[in-house]
Amino acid sequence: MSVVPSSGAAGATVRRLAITLGDPRGVGPEVAAAAARIHAAEPGRSHLLFVGPAGTGAEAAADEFLSIGSWAAGRSAAEAGRLAGLAIERAARLALAGEVDGIVTAPVDKAALFAAGYPYPGHTEMLAALSGTADVSMMMSADRTSLGGPLRVVLATTHVALSDVPRLLTSDLLVRQTRIVTESLHAGWAMDRPRVALCAFNPHASDGGRFGDEEARIYGPALDRLRADGLDVHGPLPADTVFVRAARGEFDVVIAPYHDVGMAAFKTACFGQGVNVTLGLPFVRTSPDHGTALDRAGRGQADPTSMVEALRLAERLAARRRENEARGTRAFAEGTA
């Protein structure tokens, strides 16, 4: 299917977003449909293209529907994973071809993806592979929290066993993640010099070496390199205070050393209102901050708030990317690039 950019009444191109429906057994189709209905009433809205299997009940809520097969209740987890994977692949191809301005992904079941033959622990890793991107960052973002301010948390290591984290957490990794985040916040959020906090690995940031040496051995060299580059980076700061300080406005983003220390803090402060953003991809990608909720699907209990926020953030980032590209084109034409 060829997707042609649509135009508004004044002839201006309307942003187009592809929405993948996720695992058809879960709440993805429900929250996508509900979010699309809310989105339809918003001014200046983008054109929504749903990508997924027919038969989930979500088809009618989209501006446009791209079927990658069909679904019926009672089919296997492997079939659900296959359809979810096909939708991600198709949406990624559309984004890479410039036929959509970004993608918003409904939740997938990792076990189902594996059963279908997809060797990825999640969207982040799969989209990186599909786009040929070596380094990406997984950032959770919320415009408001229970403490009042925004909170952004990046996971230095993502979907890996906790026992593997000491091996994977290196100075090079912290440097790469900090650079990706800094560049992304500058380009997508218009922050001139983002304030980055590195969350420590050990309790009390090792308390001078009493509880491990990672802070001195891994964080120290990373901080030296980043500060030499002129980045505004702080740490290592203890996990029991750094997220509170960020939510109160002291830092723009926290880089957490492993999944649960970052996600536990983030979801405690703003679960249901946050957005998962993949930084470093050649296209915009956002997702709600929750999983498939297989036990709630089809009961009318799914809350679309996070999906609505994911749509809104994708629109803002897509618009910002267009502005940056136009600015770069103008600068090049004027000989100032």
Image: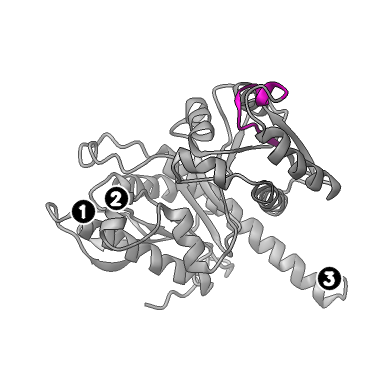
Q: Position of residue 147 (x, y in %)?
A: 59, 21
Q: Name the kind of residue labelled 3 in the image.
A: Ala
Q: Please tell me how many numbered marks the rendered image carries.
A: 3
Give the residue displayed 54% in from the left and 69% down from the top.
Answer: 132
- Judge whether 109 appears above or below 20 on screen: above
Say whether disc 3 or disc 1 marks the residue closer to the N-terminus. Answer: 1
Q: How is the image coloured?
A: one colour
Q: Nearer the viewer, residue 61 or 17?
A: 17
Q: Name the kind of residue labelled 1 in the image.
A: Ala
Q: Nearer the viewer, residue 137 or 248?
A: 137
Q: Residues within 10 Å of mark 3 (few under 14, many from 20)?
A: few
Reply yes or no: does residue 204 show up in magenta.
yes
Q: Position of residue 4 (x, y in %)?
A: 46, 75
- Judge whether 112 appears above or below 218 on screen: below
Say whether disc 3 or disc 2 marks the residue closer to the N-terminus. Answer: 2
- At mark 3, the secondary structure is loop
Q: Residues within 10 Å of mark 1 (few under 14, many from 20)?
A: some
Assess whether mark 2 and mark 1 are in contact (beta carbons under 8 angstroms): yes
Q: Which residues are magenta?
A: 197-208
Residue placed under numbered mark 3 in the picture:
337
Residue 17 visible in the current orientation: no
Q: Nearer the viewer, residue 332 or 140?
A: 140
Residue placed under numbered mark 2 in the picture:
111
Quarter that holds the N terminus: bottom left
Q: Nearer the viewer, mark 1 or mark 2?
A: 2
Q: Residues within 10 Å of mark 2 (few under 14, many from 20)?
A: some
Reply yes or no: does residue 165 show up in magenta.
no
Residue placed under numbered mark 1 in the picture:
77
- At mark 1, the secondary structure is helix
How far apart marks 3 and 2 lie (CA) works out to 47 Å
